[in-house]
Image (cartoon, rainbow, N blue to C red):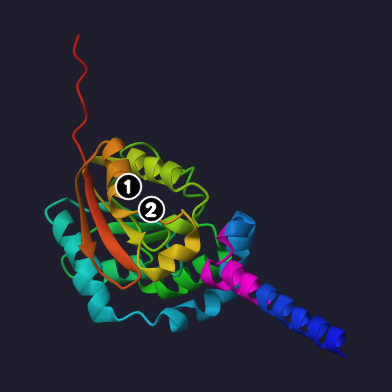
Amino acid sequence: MQTTILLLLAAVLLVGALGWLLHWLLIRTEGVFLGRRVVVWLYDLAAPRYDAIKQYDPDTESAFVAWPLSRRLKGRPAPAVLDVATGTGRLPFFLLAEPIFNGRVVGLDASVGMLAQAWAKLAAYDDRAALVRGSAVDLPFADNAFAAVTCLEALEFLPDDAAALREMARVLEPGGVLLTTRRQGAEAGYFLGRARGREELEALLAGLGLVDVRSQPWQVEYELVWAAKGPARVSQI
């Protein structure tokens, strides 16, 4: 009898441990430790419900992201913006709605499902918005092609965040604006080293030739990180 109880207890503990492991792998970290294909597959599945889950607040998105970015780009003639890991087109949608933004936005994502949701959202801006399926670590764009590059709530899910940031810096024009995010707080602990500390991320960006690197409070789980690309260096002969 005692042996049976111990076996049942062990089985319950094992099931609980497996349940927690699956929750961590599939929900908390959204498949990142299972590989890129799993991450993309999970986003494809979640795409139709993604915006409802996130419940973006238009005023907050405008005040902290879209308006500050459009203000930094003010005065540039029709600036081109690249949004890496655009998801359902969150940043393009709010940025294009800003009255002072007169440019166009390209959204890039690996998930077909997310891009489908983004295209439906951006239909009213089809002359100023474009969507591309691709990888953040191998951006299909020329050097110095964009006045601004953004990547929100995505670095910790990318297969190589340093390589992705290097690509973002490459396609950013001299004097252009980079806006990304850093995972913080208790949630960051689930990512086991994939969520960089503030000083580490700022040092990485500086090492890529970015200047005026500045972190800014935003959400409980994320802070905004702003930077700019320094001017092109002229070789001395």
Tell me the distance, in whole angstroms, between the alpha carbons under discs 2 and 1.
Answer: 6 Å
Q: Residues within 10 Å of mark 2 (few under 14, many from 20)?
A: some
Q: Residue 165: x percent and y percent? A: 38, 45
Q: Residue at x 42, y 74 (%)?
A: 121
Labels 2 & 1 near each other (Cβ < 8 A): yes
Query: Which residue does the numbered mark 1 point to in the structure image?
Result: 200
Q: Residue 188: x percent and y percent? A: 42, 64
Label 2 SS: loop
Q: Quadrant of residue 183?
A: bottom left
Q: Quadrant of the N terminus?
A: bottom right
Please identify the dominant SS of the magenta region.
helix
Q: What kind of residue is marked 1?
A: Glu
- Start-end of magenta stretch: 19-32
Q: Which mark is residue 101?
A: none
Does residue 188 appear in this view?
Answer: yes
Question: Considering depth in this image, is 141 or 87 the residue closer to the camera?
Answer: 87
Does residue 145 appear in this view?
Answer: no
Q: Residue at x 38, y 66 (%)?
A: 126
Q: Quadrant of residue 122?
A: bottom left
Q: Residue 225: x percent and y percent? A: 26, 56
> In the visual, does 183 lie left or right of 29?
left
Q: Quadrant of residue 189?
A: bottom left
